Structures are given as C-alpha cells and as structure tokens.
Image (spheres, rainbow, N blue to C red):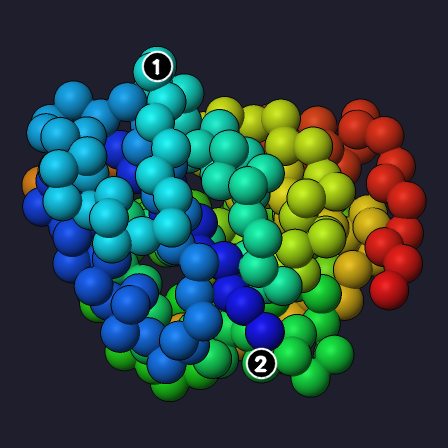
Amino acid sequence: MRLSVVIPCYNELGTISKVVEAVKASPVKNCEIIIVDDCSIDGTTKLLKSKIESQVDQVIYHHKNRGKGAALKTGFAVATGDIVIVQDADLEYDPQEYPLMIQPILDDKADVVFGSRFQGGKPHRVVYYWHMVGNTFLTMLSNMFTNINLTDMETCYKAFRREVIQSITIEENRFGFEPEITAKVAKMECRIYEVGISYYGRTYKEGKKIGWKDGVRAIICILKYNLFSYKYHKYSR
C-alpha cells in the first residue's frame, strides 16, 4: 500500500518545513509527498525550490493564486498512491494519525474517510466558538441534503481511494471544495467512514485563512452540488 499525501500550500513559510518533517515521521513509511504551492508571496516558494524539493516526490507551482480547491485538484491529478489524503501545510493536523485515517480503507470497509475534530477523545485546541458553531451548522445542512450522518464535514483530513478522488471533477477553487466533495462522494454512494482525530487549531494571527465569506460560499456549494449538480454514477468496487 502506498499513501499519497497532497499538501496545498499558500504563504506557509513558518510551517511547511515542519509539516514535511512530520509527514516523513508518520507511521506510514511508504508515502508519496506532493506539495502544490499556490503562488505564495511570503518566501515559501523560494524555500520550496532551495531546500524542500529534494526532500519530497513533487512540488508543483501555480503561477497565479487560485485557492485550496484548485491546489488539491492539481495534486490529486498526479497522485499515484493507492490511498490519497489531504494534509494542510500548517500544524493543525497530526500525520501521526494517518493509520487511523486509512485503516477503514485498508480493511475494505470504506472508500472515503473523514477525520472528525468533534468525535472521540483526542486533544482539541480551544480556539474560536463561532467557528465551531459555523462548522456545526454547515455540517448539519450538508447532512440534510446528503442524508449521511457526519459530525465534521469541513475537516481538512479526508482520505480517498485514489480511483474515487481521480474520478471526480473538482469545480471549487477555494474552501468550497469541502461541501462539494462531500456531496459528490455521497451521490456516488461511496462507503464513508468517520474517525476521531486531534486538532491543533491556529488563530488568525498564526496564519488561519478561512473567513465568513467562505462560510457563505459553503452554503451555496451545499445547495449547488446537492440540488443542481448532475447525479454521479455509483462507485463500483
């Protein structure tokens, strides 16, 4: 089994090296590391070219800032592993928990696994109350349309069988990727599991990027991809 780790990266000069080190130190040793630099302007691109390119399998550079969804689309397209997982370029999610994320797929119980920040007894940094309220609302709204019982639709940690994620056309360029991909894997009738993960959230001063406009877009995406997007064919195993 080979795991492809796709890391979308924008202005993460202070953390990208540590994230790469953390991925390399994860319990899953056969990892393909793919970084997509989304036209960083803080020196991240220079660091990637001078020091990190030689440490990973691929670094792909966007020449225009396009957003997280666009970066993931680029990374997913070149992934070659049996399982593909999303790893943000900050330190909010712990690569030590990759085995938790991929085990349901290895056991042939799941095709997609969501890592829930609100399930189980893992450590969870206490940060923004209204973000939690917003996440809960968006997850509930998404569940109402998909008829799946997630606790954390907006989580970064999502693992996919490679053939599943590469069969999906990603349309959203920013954080709308989360409700879009949730709607589409639900329409494909993928077997979806959820596992509890730890979460070390950042503040805006520490570099957090998502804002209220992304929450509004998420509502639009929930409606768009559940009500007005075409029906996906059932995933055949």
- The residue to which callout 2 is attached is 103
Position of 33 with respect to 224 (left or right) is: left
Give residue 177's position: percent from left, percent from top: 54, 37
Q: Residue tagged by mark 1? A: 64
Q: Is residue 201 above or below residue 119?
A: above
> What mark, if any, has residue 32 been given in the picture?
none
Residue pictured at 34% horizontal, 39% vertical: 59
Q: Is residue 132 left or right of residue 168?
A: left
* Quarter containing the C terminus: bottom right
- Mark 1 or mark 2, which is nearer the start of the sequence? 1
Mark 2: amino acid = Gln
Alpha carbons under labels 2 and 1: distance apart: 36 Å
Q: How many numbered marks does the figure carry?
A: 2
Viewer-proximal residue, 155 or 49? 49
Between 191 and 145, the one lying in front of the other is 191
Residue 24 image-quadrant placement = bottom left
The spot of residue 118 in percent (x, y) is 43, 69
Give the answer, above or below, for where 48 lies relative to 19. above
How dense is the environment of label 1, judged by Cα within 10 Å: few (below 14), some, or many (20 and up)?
few
Residue sitting at 68 percent across and 44 percent down?
Answer: 166
Q: Residue 134, position in %: x, y?
A: 42, 46
Image coords of residue 17 (percent x, y): 16, 52
The one of 223 and 235 positioned closer to us in this rendering: 235
Q: Residue farthest to the front?
A: 54
**Left or right: residue 234 compared with residue 64:** right
Q: Secondary structure at mark 2?
A: helix
In the image: residue 144, left or right of residue 173: right
- Residue drawn where x is 63% and y is 32% of the image: 170
Give the amino acid type for the residue marked by disc 1 in the picture: Lys
Residue at 35% in and 14% down: 64
